[in-house]
Image (cartoon, rainbow, N blue to C red):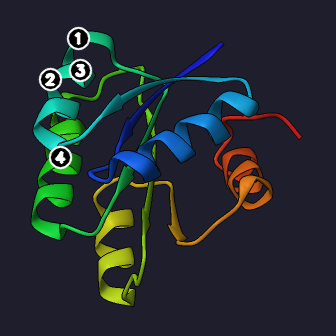
Amino acid sequence: MVECLLIESNCAERQRLARLLAELGIDCAQREKTEEGLLYYHQRIPAVVMMEASVQPSTLDFLHKVNLQRKDNQPIIILYADHPNVDAVVQSIHEGAAEFLARPFDRDLLKFKLQQAGVLRH
């Protein structure tokens, strides 16, 4: 089973996304803040990190720290936001994000993006 770290500040949205990921066969560890997520990341190094990108300095700091620690097992990082701007998307991808989703998104779009990123098979 694929292990995912989900970082989302909104409890209801975090639970919704965890349910969507579980429906797709992905085991999900949930964290509210990027600092908590980074601690979990160092302990477990999940295959996928999915995180809210609305707080850009914190998100970019997380991506930078993960990039410094990467070795052979690189997680696939998927970011999402309510109103992403082009600069934020480009900078996030430059820092190591594989995909960037605009909210709201449903199960089908999430599944498609996870397939594109190589997390799920077609």
Q: Which mark is residue 39?
A: 2
Horizontal relation, residue 98 to residue 54: left or right: right
Q: What is the distance, in whole Å, between disc 2 and disc 3 at their CAs? A: 4 Å
Residue found at x 68% / y 40%: 118
Residue at the extreme front: 12
Tell me how many marks there are: 4
What residue is drawn where x is 26% and y is 24%?
Answer: 41
Three-letter residue code for mark 1: Gln
Name the element at disc 3.
helix
Against 116, residue 28 (above or below) is: above
- Give the residue type that dot 3 points to: Tyr
Disc 3/disc 1 C-alpha distance (Å) = 5 Å
Q: Secondary structure at mark 1?
A: helix
Work out how far the residue at label 1 is from the one at label 4, CA to CA, in angstroms: 15 Å
The residue under label 1 is 43
Identify residue for label 4. Answer: 62
Q: Give residue 111's position: percent from left, percent from top.
A: 75, 48
User: Residues at badges 3 and 1 in contact (C-beta under 8 Å)?
Assistant: yes
Cβ–Cβ below 8 Å for labels 2 and 3? yes
Closer-to-camera residue (82/87): 82
- Residue 13, given in percent of the width and then of the height, sits at 45, 52
